[in-house]
Amino acid sequence: MTTCISHWTALHWHLRRICWSGKDVQSRNEYHVPEVAPGAAEAADASRALGPYLPEVAKQAQKIDVLVSKAEGRRTNKFVKCHVCTTTLPRGSVQATSLRGYDILVTSPELTFVQIAATEDLRVAAYVGMALCSSFRIDGYASSGLEKRVDQEAPLTSVKKIAAYLRRAKGVYGVDEARRALRYVCDGALSPPEGAIGLLAKLPCKCGGFGWRDVRLNVAIQVFDRVDARGHSHYTTRYPDVVISNRTSAGVRRMVGIDYDPEVTHGGEVKRHSDVRRGNQISSVRRLKHFTFTDEERTSYSAWLSSMERVRRALGKRRSRRNGSADSYDSERWEAWHLLLDHPPVL
């Protein structure tokens, strides 16, 4: 029996699978959402097959999100959380998982983003969008729990691809919410925390962010590296995790680079030297001010707020205002920090 996983189960699958650029056979075929949800036995079998692609918290919950195309095909059992979509979906909305021996389909990264946006807070939806458009893959066997998508392994999707999908997905439940959340999504995150930092910088103040529009992730910057024996200068390329730009009222363009490094103070002597060298290289760029965030910003709200205040001053930004008066938006920012950095959604 065909099963189509969706929503959070689909998200977990996508973030843990390898995505080969230009070689994804499943994208060249057309699949359709099944009419009937799996029974308890089939769902339990599918859940076991998907086990390596689910986080521990999802395994404990046991239920998997499945999608059906007819309301009468909905089933409820201890292994299934059933969703119904009777709308005609754009081509490519459903893909094969290619799990050997199992007939399991999965909603595309773009449709998965729409589904999350339809059912979750805008900030959570944008956080998920950052992960789907990222350059990392979750890998439980890696020391950091993450692997960078390199060589021929491509990002799952991009802001541009999601926007194109939304234009084709007229009438699909959640498209309007997805369009609003996509405004704050950036390509290129290399970890969930740096994606969250970029998102919190970009979100409007009423959502707990800072409303800084020009935010990019992992932008290539040429930095001075060394002088050789002949006195020639050599340069190298560095990629600050988050780059925020602003043009002041006087027309001066300012840039701030933020690196998230949770091990900057306890990664061993070699790691420490590497971090210091990298930070000094980026700091040598005349037009850019560089900050390093650690686990302190992720676990302490006061440290987070103090660091972002330094960023604001470096950018030459005015304090945020509400009804014409300066306002810290403290409750909104604490809630957003807690939701996205302190206790982020499980990806």
Image (cartoon, rainbow, N blue to C red):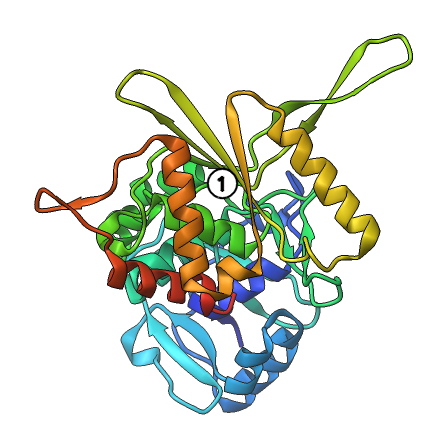
Q: Nearer the viewer, residue 127 or 24?
A: 127
Q: How many marks?
A: 1
Q: Position of residue 223 (x, y in %)?
A: 66, 23
Q: Residue furthest left?
A: 323
Q: Residue at x 63, y 46 (%)?
A: 24
Which residue in the rendered view is the most extreme toward the right?
A: 229
Q: Position of residue 345 (x, y in %)?
A: 45, 68
Q: Quadrant of residue 168?
A: top left
Above or below residue 320? Residue 243 is: above
Q: Which SS class for mark 1?
A: loop
In percent of width and height, residue 191 lies at 58, 53
Q: Kindly identify which residue carries mark 1.
A: 187
Q: Does any portion of residue 337 appear in the rendered image?
A: yes
User: Nearest the camera: 147 or 207?
Assistant: 207
Q: Is residue 344 visible?
A: no
**Quadrant of res 98:** bottom right
Q: Nearer the viewer, residue 337 or 113?
A: 337
Residue 339 position by quadrant:
bottom left
| Above-or-below relation of 303 to 56 | above
* Residue found at x 67% / y 73%: 52
For label 1, the crowd category at 10 Å Cα-Cα, with few meaning under 14, some 14 to 19 and many 20 or more, is many
Asked whether, in this view, residue 147 is left or right of residue 208, the answer is right
Q: Is residue 255 above or below residue 51?
A: above
Question: Which amino acid is tagged 1?
Answer: Asp
Residue at 68%, 53% (x, y): give it: 264
Residue found at x 59% / y 23%: 285
Residue 251 in picture, x, y percent from top left: 31, 16
Position above or below: 338 against 111:
below
